Amino acid sequence: MVSSRYAVELLGTTCITGALLGFGVLAGLGVWTVTVTLGLVTVRLVFLIGMVTVIGFALFAVLSGGLLSRGVWADRSTQERLASGPAVCAIVPAYRDGNVLDISVESLLENAYEPLTVAIVVEPDDEPTRKRAEELAAEYDRVDCLVNGTPGSKATAINYAVQQSDAEYFAVVDADERVAPEFVPAAAAALENGADVFQGRRIPRPNGAVETIAYCERIIVHSAYALFEMFGFANPKSASVVFTREAFEKIGGYRSMLTEDIAFAHECHDANLTVHQDRRCTSTMEAPHTLGDLWGQRKRWRIGQIQVLHSRLRQELRGGTGFRGVLSLARAVGSLVGGMLTLVVASHVLLLLLFEATLTLLVPFLCILATIGAVWLRDLTAGRVGRLSWTVVLVPFVYPALGVLTVKSLLEYYCTWDGEWYQVMKVGT
């Protein structure tokens, strides 16, 4: 039997999605008139609003994609690296990750930096992962296995590892992450030069049809991140990241939330920490292997964004966090609103299809594929990824899917979410 809360969520998702699409169609039928006078000649140009929206979206794709591509293709010879310096402790939180731990640990140990240690943090109730972590600790002198003293989340695992270490710098990577060999040396150099936090780039390994969609979706999201950085909001996370102990203590560590990484990014922004983004340092992670896993993982991330927004709204109502806090709140709101507005853009695309405006529709499609192609080519030549699947042509559908996902996640958070989080299947590929 379907519960009343689930029924409300399902009905609400359907109605709001339909309303956004309907609003988009009506708005897209509007007319925008431009009058140009050249001497004695006056030219009047009439455009459908839908056409203007689609072209505007294409310009957004070009700008954000260009910013991302510039970072990915930056000259590697100018990247400063340190072979030795302050002690770095690499933290690998692991839960049900025993079969993929080797990937992160061994790739970390390939980083040419001294002194570097690796702390695998396991949960007390996860015996298989603990067993593999202890085997790796026995095999490598620089690897330790810690049992989370405050179990329950990735955030508490990271915080516990920092408390147990006397290192000055801390790197955090996921268990399935194949870490770039220059990651720690480049991060140490950036922190020694005054940065509080160093953030590398992390991409799914596109070794299949669904995995290719996941890879391309991350390129789209990273493009938006690059655009937000122009306005002073960086996105340090809880993977492929290195931070100083001082920065960690200044923000009080990670928050135990569904997406502790998003909360961490907002905390760093509020504290005015200096975040150094370097997309030349690109690590890879295992991608979801089924559409169900891809949807479940992305929905968890989206619900986590809503949880962070809810928390920040309550914080503002209790007295506020100053001007930077307001900007941070606007960033959180903008992300969700932008996600839902993709449905409006999608309705304008459908409208142009009815009017057979094929050339106009090709522009944003080609802009999206150009960004993906530019980034993929860099990843391919660097040996990070292989050939993409034919499913790359389905990438434009990611945008309306993001809109539906945002609406569903918002309603699920307030109607049916009970605090559980989705974990994708990892097989070590």
Image (cartoon, grey):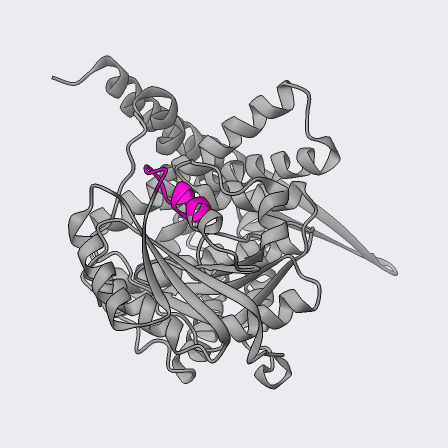
Residue with the most extreme top position: 4
Estimate the x, y position of residue 35 in percent, counting from the top left.
76, 50
The C terminus, quarter of image = bottom left
Across and down, in percent, residue 411 comes to 37, 25
Q: Looking at the figure, which quarter contains the N terminus?
A: top left
Q: Residue at x 53, y 60 (%)?
A: 167
Camera sees residue 316: yes
- Residue 362 seen: no
Front in this rendered view, residue 117 or 292: 117
Instruction: Answer with the quarter of the image where residue 191 lies.
Output: bottom right
Position of 41 relative to 52 (above/below):
below
Q: Which residues are magenta?
A: 149-160
In this picture, is 5 found above or below 267?
above
Nearest to the observer: residue 384 or residue 165: 165
Asked if residue 392 lies in the magenta stretch, the reply is no
* Residue at x 42%, y 50% (from the top left corner): 161
Question: Is 154 within the magenta?
Answer: yes
